[in-house]
Amino acid sequence: LNLLYLSSSCDAKDLKPLLEIMKNSNKKIKLHISGNGNNKIIELINNFNLSERVIFLGKVADKKIVDLINSCDIGVYLKQFNSPMGNASTMVKVSEYLACGKPVMFPEMTGVIEQAGNAGIILDNGAPIVLNSFAANKKLLEQYSQNARKQAVEKLDLNKNANELKDFLEKIVYGKKV
């Protein structure tokens, strides 16, 4: 089972909960991280005895991101933000994973939970059980992948979202009943 963490700024604080989960998961589960990792991150990975299971991919060109996402099984989003704009940037990465039909693992954040729907995996004490289940049962992973793609089609349709926004604005600005 291959997890993918695409990040422009990988932070040890954000990565630690995932490493704790990996330590308690099937040894065949690997984590692929874009970027090279800094000394603090590498030390953290070594402290968890995960150096054989964490692979740094180096800088990934934008045009290679879709292929990279498609080569893995589960997308990971780890950043936690306290500002509304930070949460908005989260949605882009989560959307990329969902659009490629990949379940998404993330810290508990209301917007992400809603966006990922039944293709989401919350980073908590139950996550090792979920990952082990995926590693042992490819049909379960397949179902989550189908859920991810369905979620993307239903929630990320540009025309549908534009029409909903138009209706909302007409209701607010002009008082029209929609």
Image (cartoon, rainbow, N blue to C red):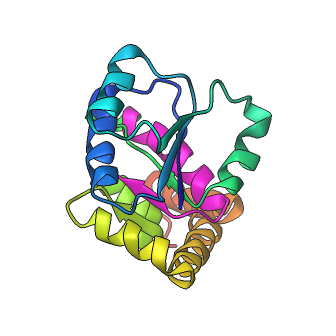
Left or right of 166 in this view: 108: left
Say which residue appears at 28% left-offset and 38% top-offset. Answer: 48
Instruction: Give the extent of the magenta segment.
Output: 86-109
Quick check: 116 above or below 140? above
Q: Does residue 107 show up?
A: no
Q: Please indicate, yes or no, whether residue 73 appears anywhere in the rendered image.
A: yes
The image shows residue 35, relative to residue 122, as above or below, that is above
Q: Residue furthest bottom?
A: 139
Q: Could you tell me residue 8's position as x and y percent?
A: 53, 26
Residue 2, position in %: x, y? 55, 55
Q: Nearer the viewer, residue 39 or 63?
A: 39
Q: Quadrant of residue 170?
A: bottom right
Indicate left or right for 44 with 104 as reference.
left
Q: Quadrant of residue 60?
A: top right
Q: Which residue is drawn at the image coordinates 64% and 65% (left, top)?
A: 101
Q: What residue do we see at 35% from left, 33% from top?
A: 45
Residue extending farthest to the top is 39
Q: Position of residue 52 (x, y in %)?
A: 47, 41
Q: Nearer the viewer, residue 146 or 163?
A: 146
Counting labels gives 0
Report if residue 22 lies within the magenta region: no
Closer to the camera, 149 or 1? 1
Furthest toward the right, the residue is 63
Position in image of residue 140 (x %, y %): 50, 82
Q: Toward the viewer: 117 or 76?
A: 76
Q: Is residue 97 left or right of residue 79?
A: right
**Which residue is located at x 41 percent, y 58 percent?**
27
